[in-house]
Image (cartoon, helix red, strand yellow):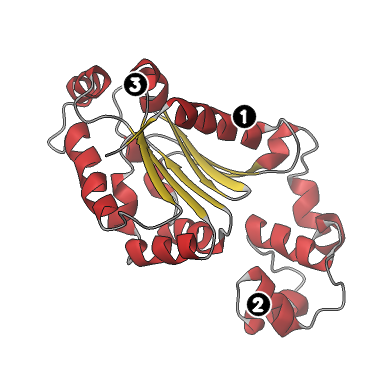
Amino acid sequence: MADANLTARQLAGRVGVTPKTVERWLADEALIPHPRNRADVSDALGVDELMLWPSAVRGVLKTGPDRELIAAYPYRSACPTSVWASLIGDATTDITFAGYTNYFVWLEQPALHQTLRRKAESGCRVRFLLGHPESSTTRQREAVEDVALTVSTRIRITLEHLDKLSGVPGVEARYSAPEDGTNHVSLSVFRFDAHALVTPHLARLVGHDSPMMHLRRMQDGGMFDRFAEHADELWGRGTAIA
């Protein structure tokens, strides 16, 4: 149960910010933390966010399914790499990369191999769902995108990185089933416990040029659950990568 009598230092530790940041929030009523930090502080204190930052919450008050939408980005590349790092670092039970290639995370997140190894060794499930580099879906997508860094090359980049995690208990990798190729390549789901980053791929655009949503699970059957179940369904029909 959350503790409403935390010190600034204890609260900072739970939220993942510095004590000075918490002190600034307390000293300046006009200073409004990032939505994710507001949610984390509310959880830690066991009080409604409306009590802590009424002006901010009233301006964006959500009561329906869209309350699970933490942030939306017009481009995946517009999401700060620090958000990815924070979500990966905070996850304790489930990390799922269900993009078709997943190659960009290795480029943008330093020492990802070591991080995922530590996560798996501490009991976190780590899953990678990839498209098959030689499938008809991959060939069709390469023709559509028509870029130098092909889809199959991007998949093989991930496969090379996954080789370094081969044999680590808790780390699994699968190819999506051939019949799921179209569904997989058109929607990327990246899950980190109760948070998810979701990218619907638009027409001829590559992943980093497509929009992305940051979701946080707040209810049964909400947006988070819908996308998480989609990824789980594809995973269930996938085949292990030898």
Residue sitting at 66 percent across and 83 percent down? 19
3D distance between C-alphas at marks 3 and 2: 43 Å
- Please tell me whether mark 3 sits on a helix, a strand or a loop: loop
For mark 3, what is the residue? 203
- Please tell me whether mark 2 sits on a helix, a strand or a loop: helix
* Res 211 quadrant in image: top left
As shown in the figure, which amino acid type bears the numbered disc 1?
A: Arg
> Is 59 situated left or right of 3 in this image?
left
Q: Are marks 1 and 3 in contact (CB under 8 Å)?
A: no
The quadrant of the picture occupied by the N terminus is bottom right
As shown in the figure, which amino acid type bears the numbered disc 2?
A: Gly
Q: Return the mark for residue 226.
A: 1
Residues 126 and 147: in front is 126
Q: Residues within 10 Å of mark 2 (few under 14, many from 20)?
A: few
- Please tell me whether mark 1 sits on a helix, a strand or a loop: helix
As shown in the figure, which amino acid type bears the numbered disc 3?
A: Ala
3D distance between C-alphas at marks 2 and 1: 32 Å
The residue mark sitting in front, 1 or 3, is 1
Residues 60 and 230: in front is 230
For mark 2, what is the residue? 13
> Is 181 situated left or right of 18 in this image?
left
Residue sitting at 36 percent across and 36 percent down? 174
Residue sitting at 61 percent across and 71 percent down? 16
Image coordinates for residue 130, horizontal then vertical, percent: 34, 35
